[in-house]
Image: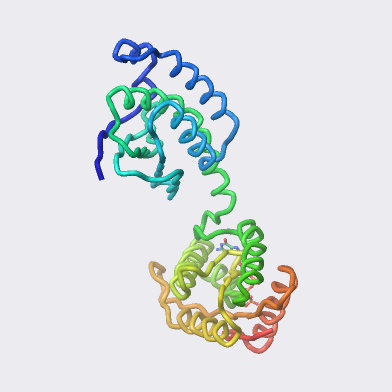
Amino acid sequence: MNVAHRKTISSEATKLAYLAPHMDTPTEDLLAAGQSLSFKLQQTLDVEALLALFCEQASHIIPCSSVAFRNDEQSLFIYHGDKHDFTCQYTLELESELLGQVECSSHKAFSETDLMRLEHLLTLLLFPLRNALLYHQAVQMSQQDPLTLLPNRAAFNKAIDTEISRAYRHKHGMCMLVVDIDHFKSINDTYGHLAGDQVLQQVARSLESSVRKEDMVFRYGGEEFVILLNATNLPNARLTAERIRMELEAKSMKGLEVNLSVTASVGVSEWQDGEQANTLFHRADQALYSAKQSGRNQVKVA
Ligand SMILES: Nc1nc2c(ncn2[C@@H]2O[C@H](COP(=O)(O)OP(=O)(O)OP(=O)(O)O)[C@@H](O)[C@H]2O)c(=O)[nH]1
């Protein structure tokens, strides 16, 4: 890989007036491209669409075949176009705020003029990108439970339909676990709400570490969690539920004044061909109810 350039772009970095005297070609086309780009960038708050628009527009005026963008804070990595060997990288900043890193690639080396043009276009990206990042963050936050940092019920409602479609398309099965901490109210009542919060956080981590990376754990509400196990049949889902239950039972909650452990009851349901999300959930919830009725700290299958 041939990295031509590394630089920080901030709102003051490369104004057109500053660029013009350095350029050996007229700036009218750059001015027109900049106006068109600015106009288009105002039309979306989607970071991915924004970067795609930027790449397409930039490719009209400089050799730019791909744009990659990374923002670690929001765990964002976006890629658009076909990557080639010659690259240039920029750190984007706006009013001292780090927006992320961008890398453009081309099939031929960027000339000095190309780089100055690109830098001018990047300055036009800064404000729309910051707005899009703020929007992305707001959407992310609305889907995340602030206490456990797990995806919340809204995220579950969004994910379940996608997972059902995937299971239907690939014919690979899918199971749902509803996990509910036993006698959680008495933990709150005995040790206080803060201790209860810590227990919820540690249960969340335990659930995450008990399942595969491709499975999804949600905090459905209160002390209830939902887990989606994709490409999993009922016997394996039951084994997973049993493992989750045993790991929780064996776990000693850290950081609390007393040596506390918790147990959980689990309801399991397997998606039936053509079944809707609400009945799949209802069956798992009924199985959970049955586990509670049978004495708690156990797994029941719908
Ligand atoms: N600390 C804390 N407690 C919560 C939170 N959300 C819900 N709760 C508490 O969770 C408790 C749930 O109590 P119940 O629904 O009676 O269930 P339980 O005591 O676990 O009893 P079983 O489920 O029947 O075993 C209530 O006391 C809620 O106040 C939270 O975010 N933090």
Residue name at image x 54 percent, y 22 percent: 36
| Image coordinates for residue 217, horizontal then vertical, percent | 54, 67
Instruction: From the viewer's side, name the closer residue of 215 and 35.
Output: 35
Instruction: From the viewer's side, name the closer residue of 191 and 1.
Output: 1
Examine the image and state in which quarter residue 85 appears: top left
Examine the image and state in which quarter residue 268 appears: bottom right
Residue name at image x 71 percent, y 68 percent: 277
Examine the image and state in which quarter residue 49 appears: top right
Q: Is residue 112 left or right of residue 143?
A: left
Above or below for 22 versus 214? above
Instruction: From the viewer's side, name the closer residue of 35 and 233.
Output: 35
Residue name at image x 66 percent, y 68 percent: 164
| Image coordinates for residue 232, horizontal then vertical, percent | 56, 79
Applied colour scheme: rainbow
Instruction: From the viewer's side, name the closer residue of 213 and 289.
Output: 213
Above or below for 133 versus 197? above
Q: Quadrant where the N terminus lies?
A: top left
| Image coordinates for residue 286, horizontal then vertical, percent | 72, 79
| Image coordinates for residue 302, horizontal then vertical, percent | 69, 84
